[in-house]
Image: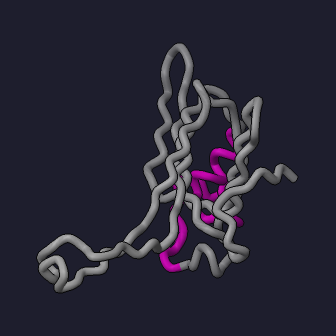
Amino acid sequence: LGYTRNGAEVTEEGYFVDGPGDENGGDDGPPIDIIYMGQTARIRVEMTKWDEQVLNYVRSRVANSNANTDLGQPGDAGPLLFAGSKDIRVLLKPALLPLNFPRCIVREPIEIGKGTKYSTAICTFEAHKNNSGVLWNRVIT
């Protein structure tokens, strides 16, 4: 997609459900246990150099769309992003230890600044586990 300004920011977020019990006052008290439900990750990139065609693809928000001819024309509501294979892969290639997120969507706003000195594009990708249970790995190919 492009080159970032000062790298990408990766935030991993866990999901939990409280297990209430009478031992601690029931629903009104603190949980007696906590259930881990999985996690997602957010990848935020602020770019000062990018491939316009690839950015248009990301801006379409739905992989496999005709982003370069339909730019500015949001598609119909309703496609299933995971079941319809409309998610995208995000690969971060820093100097050390790449991070591959095989299943991402673009849910957050996309910011494109058009400055007189240089332009910036800011995208936040939301990563989810793929069908193999992988949130991220080190696979580059």
Q: Nearer the viewer, residue 6 or 17?
A: 17
Q: Residue furthest front?
A: 23
Q: Where is the N terminus found, in terms of image quarters?
A: top right
Residue at (14, 74) in percent of width and height: 29
Which quadrant would residue 25 be assigned to in this image?
bottom left
Above or below: residue 89 compared with residue 3: below
Residue at (81, 53) in percent of width and height: 139
Q: Residue furthest top?
A: 117
Tell whether 87 sits left or right of 34: right
Tell whether 15 sits left or right of 121: left
Whether the magenta-drawn stretch holds residue 25 is answered as no
Residue at (52, 61) in percent of width and height: 40
How was the colour assigned to the protein in this rendering?
one colour
Horizontal and vertical percent for residue 26?
Answer: 16, 83
Q: Nearer the viewer, residue 18 or 73?
A: 18
Whether the magenta-drawn stretch holds residue 58 is answered as yes
Horizontal and vertical percent for residue 112?
Answer: 50, 36
Horizontal and vertical percent for residue 61?
Answer: 57, 60
Please indicate, yes or no, whether residue 68 appears anywhere in the rendered image: no
Please indicate, yes or no, whether residue 46 appears anywhere in the rendered image: yes
Horizontal and vertical percent for residue 130?
Answer: 67, 71
Q: Give the range drawn in magenta.
A: 52-78
Residue at (68, 39) in percent of width and height: 52
